[in-house]
Amino acid sequence: MAIVLLGIVSVMVASFASGAMQSYFDAERRTELVDTTETALRRLQRDVRLALPNSIRTTVVGTTAYLEFLPIVTGGRYRAELAGATPPGSCGVGANNLLQFGVADSSFVTLGPVSDLPVSSPAGVAAPNYLVVYNLGPGFSNADAYASGSATGGNKALLGSTSSGACESTIDFASHAFTLASPGARFHIISRPVTYACNLATGQLLRYGNYSITAAQPTPPAGNPALVLDGVSACTLAYDANALSQRLGIVSIRLTRTLEGESIRLSHDVMVDNAP
């Protein structure tokens, strides 16, 4: 009799323990599913916030959504006018080398030193950087950083050598005649493009980088992409350039991920500054 009762109790305990353990494993799997997906979306979000103003472009080809942008390395304000009287302070007039428009130029100094300047980017290097002034995006003549491809042209020039002192930075670039000045005397230094591709055929979110700038959006870009996320069962990468105003756009990311029969859907809206 005791053995029978012990067997019944053992079965009951095992049943309760099994259910508790299954619940624990289910919760752990769901937590991992959310955490890994959220981490991937936050990485995409951080990248997009570094986009050159008006450089984001999206498209869908078959079952793959593409989002491309030109990442900013650093930026600042160029000297737009020659200094008059020597200002007070230890810096004085400085080099007094302004950025000229309408004629070929190849060097200027900045208003104050610029941090994180690339040391140099001579012609022929594997991953060149570019100087960009007043980027308005596709459809604007001489104001679209994609238009000239990987060559100097329009509002973009291959970056040369750079140097910084306590009062200003000097930036050399491939000789070029910029035509449109920035109202705020802003410039940006960019690196090669980045593309996120959401491929529903393979269920993967991929990141492409370090490929040549092209006038038309590449689908897909050249090179071997890095895997950001797998198990993607639905995905939307959308961009509204004038969502809030002419200077503020929104990138909308909608992603569904499925793992072991369970699915989650996360949405991120990323505000981007389009003031050139």
Image (cartoon, rainbow, N blue to C red):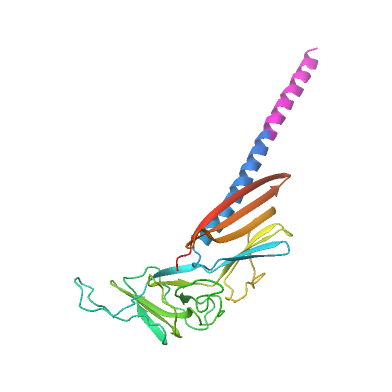
Q: Is residue 251 above or below residue 68?
A: above
Instruction: Please say whether residue 255 is visible from this viewpoint.
Output: yes
Percent of width and height locating residue 186: 40, 71
Determine the residue located farthest toward the top in the rendered image.
Answer: 1
Number of marks in picture:
0
Residue sitting at x 71%, y 57%: 203
Can residue 230 be seen here? no
Query: Does residue 274 appear to the left or right of 163 in the view shown?
Result: right
Q: Quadrant of the C terminus?
A: bottom left
Q: Is residue 14 magenta?
A: yes
How far across and how far down the image is residue 173, in percent? 43, 82
Q: Main secondary structure of the magenta part?
A: helix
Q: Which residues are magenta?
A: 1-22
Question: In the visual, does 104 lie left or right of 111?
Answer: right
- Residue at (37% x, 72% y) in the render: 185
x and y, in percent, of residue 104 in the image: 42, 87
Side of 79 where 157 appears, left or right: right
Residue 84 position, x and y percent, is 23, 79
Q: Is residue 243 magenta?
A: no
7 in relation to 240, above or below = above
Left or right: 236 as drawn, with respect to 189: right
Up/down of 253 relative to 2, above or below: below
The quadrant the N terminus occupies is top right
Depth check: give the residue in front, 74 or 1: 74
Relative height, residue 26 to residue 202 (above, below)? above
What residue lies at 58% left-to-right and 60% top-to-bottom? Answer: 239
Q: Residue furthest left?
A: 88
